[in-house]
């Protein structure tokens, strides 16, 4: 049974206000808290290490699986390995994410390693949200690793969100795409205080006609630091686009590192990056409508990260 704090964390990272429909596996403080499978989606505990296998039958459509993690005890450090096997011709939504509420003095850390094996002609939407709370001095640390292996004509859309409370994170995503496969990534990130966040993306476009679009929008406040690295490798006729758009405030530090590697004359690769402060005319316009400077900044950041 989940307590009030754990339910609040579930609301933040998975938009859950009760038991979800469909398949789910809820992990709380290092232990399985709840699980449900369906006729088309099976969830199996790994025998050799901590984690689960999620097996989705070919042809499964209009179904979802939730696998959120919540930590509400200080001092927990864990690494969990989750593998997703998505059959051919599927159309499913996968919701993950981790919330840490640390009211103690010890660091709490969750490192999740997710691998996706996406079958031919399948479409998945993957949502991963990270959140930190609690008034303790212990850090909230999250280091997710995501690997995506897409077969022919598959489509993967990833929504990667971290808006509040995570002290340190290194987010690593690697993908390999076969012919006709598409991968779309939308990252939204905000850091404040002394927080640090590193995002690393590497997409291998191996099959003819494969494509990717990786876009990060971030806000860095106070003394926080962000590093964004995006590498797109075009090994055949393909198209790739990466974009980093960041707002920098106060004494923050933001780095954007692009890498385009074309190994074929028909590889069309583009990278864009923009880092800057909030435009003064935007602030003045909103303040003329009666908002304080802080309220105006909040409105602009909210719209930017939406």
Image (tube, helix red, strand yellow):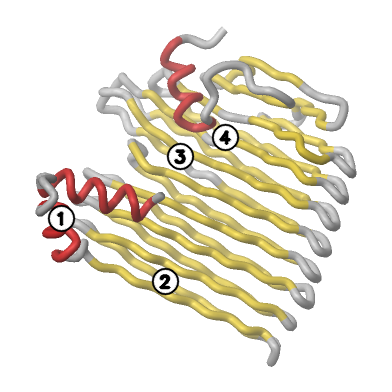
Q: Quadrant for residue 253, please give it.
A: bottom left
Say whether disc 4 or disc 3 marks the residue closer to the N-terminus: 4
Residue 273 % position (x, y): 39, 73
Residue that carries the numbered disc 1 in the rendered image:
250
Please state which of the two labelled residues, at mark 1 or mark 4, is closer to the viewer: 1
Residue 100 % position (x, y): 42, 28
- The crowd level at tag 2 (other Cα within 10 Å; few <14, some 14-19, many 20+) is few
Mark carried by residue 79: 4
Q: Name the foreground residue: 150 vs 298.
A: 298
Say whether disc 3 or disc 1 marks the residue closer to the N-terminus: 3
Q: Quadrant for residue 181, please give it.
A: bottom right
Numbered disc 3: secondary structure: strand
Quadrant for the N terminus in the image: top right
What residue is shown at x 42% (from left), y 44% (from top)? Answer: 162
Q: Is residue 232 left or right of residue 63?
A: left
Say whether disc 1 or disc 4 marks the residue closer to the N-terminus: 4
Tell me, yes or no, whether the two marked residues, 2 and 1, touch with CB atoms within 8 Å. Answer: no
Numbered disc 1: secondary structure: loop
When the figure is inspected, residue 219 is found, relative to residue 41, above or below; the finding is below
Tell me, yes or no, whether the two marked residues, 3 and 2, touch with CB atoms within 8 Å. Answer: no
Residue that carries the numbered disc 3 in the rendered image:
142
What residue is shown at x 61% (from left), y 34% (from top)? Answer: 80
When the figure is inspected, residue 204 is found, relative to residue 62, above or below; the finding is below
Say whether disc 2 or disc 1 marks the residue closer to the N-terminus: 1
CA separation, marks 4 and 3? Answer: 10 Å
Residue that carries the numbered disc 2 in the rendered image:
257
CA separation, marks 1 and 4? Answer: 34 Å
Numbered disc 2: secondary structure: strand
What residue is shown at x 48% (from left), y 54% (from top)? Answer: 187
CA separation, marks 3 and 1? Answer: 24 Å
């Amino acid at each position: 049974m989940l307590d009030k704090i754990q339910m609040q964390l579930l609301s933040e990272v998975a938009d859950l206000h009760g038991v979800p429909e469909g398949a789910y596996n809820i992990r709380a403080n290092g232990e399985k808290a709840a699980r449900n499978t369906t006729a088309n989606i099976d969830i199996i505990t790994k025998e050799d290490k901590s984690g689960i296998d999620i097996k989705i039958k070919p042809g499964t459509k209009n179904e979802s699986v939730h696998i959120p993690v919540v930590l509400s005890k200080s001092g927990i450090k864990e690494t969990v390995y989750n593998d997703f096997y998505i059959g051919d011709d599927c159309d499913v939504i996968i919701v993950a994410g981790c919330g840490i509420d640390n009211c103690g003095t010890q660091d709490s850390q969750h490192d999740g390693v997710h691998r996706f094996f996406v079958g031919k002609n399948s479409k998945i939407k993957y949502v991963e949200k990270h959140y930190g709370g609690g008034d303790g001095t212990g850090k909230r640390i999250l280091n997710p690793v995501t690997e995506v292996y897409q077969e022919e004509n598959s489509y993967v859309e990833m929504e990667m969100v971290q808006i509040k409370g995570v002290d340190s994170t290194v987010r690593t995503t690697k993908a390999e795409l076969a012919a006709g496969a598409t991968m779309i990534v939308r990252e939204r990130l905000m850091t404040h205080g002394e927080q640090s966040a590193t995002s690393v993306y590497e997409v291998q476009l191996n099959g003819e006609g494969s494509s990717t679009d990786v876009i990060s929008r971030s806000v860095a406040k106070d003394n926080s630091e962000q590093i964004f690295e995006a590498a797109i490798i075009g090994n055949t006729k393909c198209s790739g686009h990466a974009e980093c758009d960041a707002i920098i405030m106060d004494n923050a530090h933001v780095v954007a590192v692009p890498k385009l590697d074309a190994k074929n004359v028909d590889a069309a690769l583009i990278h864009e990056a923009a880092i800057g402060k909030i435009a003064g005319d935007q602030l003045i316009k909103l303040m003329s409508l009666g908002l304080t400077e802080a309220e105006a900044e909040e409105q602009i950041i909210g719209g930017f990260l939406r």
